[in-house]
Image: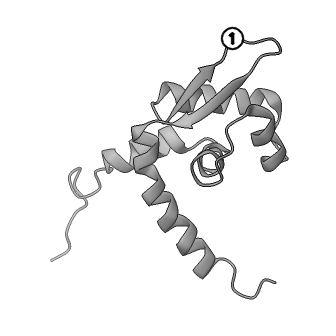
Amino acid sequence: MIMKKTEQSIQRCVTISTVQKILGGKWKIEILYYIGKQDIRRFGELRRHIGEITESSLTKQLRELESDGFIHRHDFKEVPPKVEYTLTELGESFMRVLDVIKDWGDLNLNKGKT
């Protein structure tokens, strides 16, 4: 008997869809990596490490990560301006996932590369 695809059998996973929408920005995972794993907290440092990102893109991605609860922005109210980004509890909890993603990438994506 051939089974028809029903709405239930092809239903999207809401959780995965939501995570993809939140972290789907081109640079978001890399930004979280540098803040959480490399202890890089300043805008200029992030921009130098990522390299290819524009100021406006970095600003947009940081604002979205802050709005989604992954990072906290601390403005020191100094001249010249000093702002640092740190992970929130939600961002910290994502670091375990990031470790697994990096380990998988190291194992599977770097084969044959020097």
Q: At 45% across and 36% down in the image, what residue appears?
A: 88
For residue 27, above or below residue 66:
below
Horizontally, is 47 left or right of 31 in the view? right
Circle 1 SS class: loop
The residue drawn where x is 53% and y is 74% is: 104
Rendering coords of residue 96 (x, y %): 43, 59
Q: Crowding near pointer 1: few (<14 within 10 Å), some, many (20+)?
A: few
User: Where the C terminus falls, by quadrant?
Assistant: bottom right
Horizontal side of 62 relative to 17 (left or right) equals right
The answer to whether 15 is drawn above or below residue 88 in the figure is below
Residue drawn at the location 84% of the way across and 47% of the way down: 51
Image-based side of 67 in relation to 9, left or right:
right
Quadrant assignment, res 54:
top right
- Percent position (x, y) of residue 50? 78, 48
2 or 24: nearer the viewer: 24
Up-down: is 81 above or below 64? above
Q: Position of residue 32 (x, y in %)?
A: 59, 46
Choose between 19 and 38: the one closer to the eye. Answer: 38
Name, please, the residue furthest toward the bottom: 112
Of 39 and 67, the residue lying toward us: 39
- On the rendered image, what quadrant is the N terminus found in? bottom left
In the rendered image, residue 57, in percent from the top left (x then y), is placed at 74, 32
Colour scheme: one colour
Q: Residue at x 25, y 60 (%)?
A: 5
Task: Judge whether 8 appears above or below 112 on screen.
Answer: above
Name the residue at the left extreme.
1
- Picture mark count: 1
Q: Which residue is mark 1?
A: 77
Instruction: Tell me the amino acid under the disc marked 1.
Output: Lys
